[in-house]
Amino acid sequence: MLSKSLTQTFTPYPWQGNEWETFSNLLDTGKLPHAVLISGPGEIGKRQFAMALAARLFCQSLLDGRPCLQCKGCTLLAGGSHPDFFLLELADKGKSISVDSIRELAEFTTKTPMLRGWRVALIDPAEAMTHNAANALLKTLEEPGRDTLLILVHQQRAELLPTIRSRCQSFLFPVPGQALTIEWLQSNVEVEDYVDLLEKACWRPLRAVRIAGDGALDQIIQIEKVLADVAAGLLSPVLAAEQCKTIPPAELLESVLVQQSNVIAAIVKENGTPSRGHFLFLDQLIVARRQLASKTNPNPQLLIEELLFGWRRLQSQLQSRPQSRPG
Ligand SMILES: [Zn+2]
């Protein structure tokens, strides 16, 4: 089944030039593997890259090696009706990709391509597959049939069966460099300080656009203030959690996670050594994110309180610790 949420633009982002060249070379030399795993942090444009790759395979009149966006192949893909394209994604956030969906995908790969070209199946996010779904995919990954490309998009660090990984060729997409990102941001959002926006977005361009656009920036500023107040002992973790009640727990957690990652990165950049507490708190955040995503934690509010206690504890440790020196 095809989804309406297909990305409308099928060109790679400016910061994906190297990756695009790599894939183009593999394709031109007939070395494109039949299953690829595109892995990397969220909101850096992995899905769009995968769609651009699909468009490149379907396009009937490439322009400088890029999809023309005009031909039958491109048009069908853009309209979400290309018969040789199969997209598996999450219909609702938090749900998983079921074994039945994987069976549909497997059946798709046994059919002859309607347009006598490539068949492309895209699974995004691959980590959303249930254990059974992932196991059901193994056989298709091994023998997907001729002229078939399976693209798995995967959020770095999310769990994925080793047997899935080993059957795909992995490509790690990094967080893009600042220069290209800022240039792109300038033509997409209007803010006063692009570096500040990127910092709040953990250097992920699509997140930067999202938070600049939907008022999330105010929310982040509110979270930063709450964290500062808790750190200074002006606000108890319980009251702080109460104040943040209107913010969805997942977003609150993500903001704190971004901030904590930035803090650690800044210390390392200055040749300092982050304390053990920094990493423990980061671990706590990552575990909490997993719990929230899997809905195994029955009480998100309590989880946020625990996090704020963790944050307070870290700040107390840092305040009582002798100043760390670079070196
Ligand atoms: Zn085309």
Image: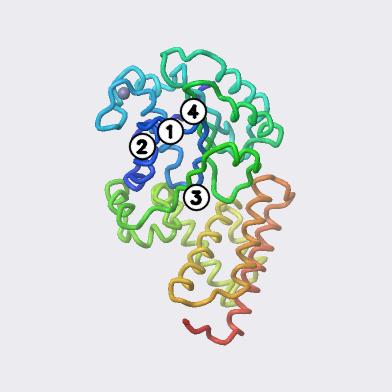
- x 36%, y 45%: residue: 16
Cα distance in 3D space between marks 4 and 1: 12 Å
N-terminal of the pair, mark 1 or mark 3, is 1
Point out residue 193 in the picture as x, y percentages from the top left corner.
32, 61
Identify the amino acid type marked 1.
Lys
- The residue that label 4 is drawn on is 149
Contact between labelled residues 2 and 1, with CB atoms less than 8 Å apart: yes
Element type at marker 3? Answer: loop
N-terminal of the pair, mark 4 or mark 1, is 1
Q: Quadrant of ligand 1?
A: top left
Identify the amino acid type marked 2.
Asn
Identify the amino acid type marked 3.
Pro
Cα distance in 3D space between marks 2 and 4: 15 Å
Cα distance in 3D space between marks 2 and 3: 24 Å
Closer to the eye: label 4 or 3: 4
User: On the picture, is 145 further left or further right than 189?
Assistant: right
Q: How is the image coloured?
A: rainbow
- The residue that label 3 is drawn on is 41
- The residue that label 2 is drawn on is 25
N-terminal of the pair, mark 4 or mark 3, is 3
- Within 10 Å of disc 4 (Cα), the crowding (few <14, some 14-19, many 20+) is many
Contact between labelled residues 1 and 4, with CB atoms less than 8 Å apart: no
**Observer able to see residue 9:** no
- Within 10 Å of disc 1 (Cα), the crowding (few <14, some 14-19, many 20+) is few
- x 58%, y 38%: residue: 126
Q: Is disc 4's CB within 8 Å of ligand 1?
A: no
User: On the picture, is 188 further left or further right than 95?
Assistant: left
